[in-house]
Amino acid sequence: MKVIGVTGPSGAGKTTLSEFLKNMYNAQVIDADKIAKKLSNDVNTDYFKEIIKLFGKDNLQKDGCLNRKKIAEIIYNNSEKRNQLNLLTFKYVVNEIVKILNQLRLENNLEYVCIDVPLLYEAKMEDICDIVIAVIADDEQKISRICERDNIDKELAKQRLKIQNSNQFFIEKADYVIENDGTKERLEKKLKEIMDKI
């Protein structure tokens, strides 16, 4: 079972690439963001409790769930809180991913597992991947995709990108880099070239 890490900045096309791996190569996709969301939606998890400790109960909604919009505003404007939240996320989400991988290895019927992790290097997850593919794109495309996906304006999308790693960071670190210029056909072709080498 080969573990393929997929990473890159927001709006570059990680989800699309992961979908291609799933559809073209029957890869099981583990989405770090979805795991983080699931764990932070469950008021009984240690992750949820530690987030409340970090941000305070005034960042809860009336139903007791996290007010994600308020927390997002805080972390995009406060690097200390952002780093603290990232450390919590790495601790609990990486743990969960390792558990899932161990279970999949026991089942032993998969050729590929894809882990979609935006902060793969910060979470030191490259060590559990056989290869890492980074997806990058130019800023205009990333901004346009973020605006469409998250239903936010351009300025907010630019702010989000400002606190993320540059394309160069991923180019220097990843085993393979795919520049996603917007056409799915080309993305698919570039992935196929990489998978043929693997």
Image (spheres, helix red, strand yellow):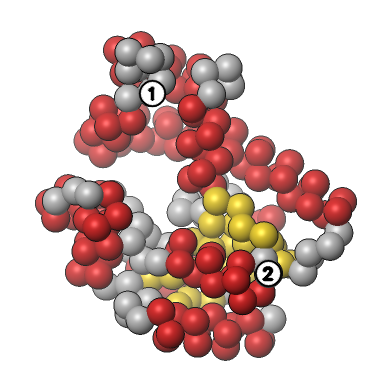
Residue at x 67%, y 60% (from the top left corner): 28
Q: Quadrant of the N terminus?
A: bottom right
Q: Amino acid at mark 2?
A: Asn
Residue 139 picture quarter: bottom left
Left or right, 119 with reference to 81: right
Residue 54 shows in the view? no
Q: Is residue 49 above or below residue 68?
A: above
Determine crowd level at label 1: few under 14, some 14-19, many 20+ residues with C-alpha closer than 10 A.
many
Q: Pinpoint residue 115: horizontal percent, then vertical percent.
A: 60, 57
**Nearer mark to the viewer, of 1 and 2:** 2
Q: Pinpoint residue 86: horizontal percent, then vertical percent.
A: 45, 37
Residue bearing the label numbered 1: 66
Q: Amino acid at mark 1?
A: Leu
Q: How many marks?
A: 2
Residue bearing the label numbered 2: 26
Q: Give the spatial CA distance, label 1 vs label 2.
A: 34 Å
Q: Pinpoint residue 110: horizontal percent, then vertical percent.
A: 78, 64
Q: Is residue 98 above or below residue 181?
A: above
Element type at marker 2? loop
Q: Is residue 119 above or below residue 20?
A: above
User: Which mark is first along the chain, 2 or 1?
Assistant: 2
Residue 103 shows in the view? yes
